[in-house]
Amino acid sequence: MCIQALRGEKGARLGDTIVASVKEAQPGFKVKKGDVVYAFVLCAAMQQGRCDGSEVKFDDNAAVLVNK
């Protein structure tokens, strides 16, 4: 779950760094449920327009955790 987009705007888009809360975690990992982490947005379900006029849309939202 996104807590804050570090870009300074209301929401986050593809390629943005965000502050997020972990909703699900696998047992045995360093990250636990409820931890606040930094993440990089890879896929977003919301349509994103490109310069050439095409649009990119994914089925799910996805992010990668980063060390900061």
Image (spheres, rainbow, N blue to C red):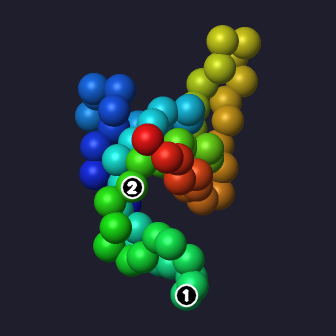
At 60% from the left edge and 25% from the top edge, which residue is drawn? 49
- The residue where tag 2 is placed is 37
* Left or right for 53, reference 66: right
Whether residue 46 is visible to the viewer of this picture, yes or no, is no
Q: Between residues 63 and 13, which one lies in front from this camera angle? A: 63
- The residue where tag 1 is placed is 27
At 58% from the left edge and 51% from the top edge, which residue is drawn? 64
Q: Residues within 10 Å of mark 2 (few under 14, many from 20)?
A: some
At 39% from the left edge and 77% from the top edge, which residue is drawn? 33
Q: Secondary structure at mark 1?
A: loop
Q: Quadrant of residue 57?
A: top right
Query: Where does residue 28 sit, x and y in percent of width and height?
Result: 57, 85
Q: Quadrant of residue 55?
A: top right
The three-letter code of the residue at mark 2 reads Val
Query: Where does residue 25 sit, x and y in percent of width and height?
Result: 50, 78
Query: Where does residue 12 sit, x and y in percent of width and height?
Result: 41, 37
Q: Secondary structure at mark 2?
A: strand
The N terminus lies in quadrant: bottom left
At 55% from the left edge and 87% from the top edge, which residue is drawn? 27
Q: Between residues 47 and 17, which one lies in front from this camera angle? A: 17
- Give residue 5's mark: none
Q: Between residues 45 and 8, which one lies in front from this camera angle? A: 8
Q: Between residues 11 and 35, which one lies in front from this camera angle? A: 35
The three-letter code of the residue at mark 1 reads Pro
Marks 2 and 1: in contact by CB < 8 Å? no
Quick check: 67 above or below 47? below
How far apart are the two marked residues, 1 and 2, measured between alpha carbons?
Answer: 17 Å
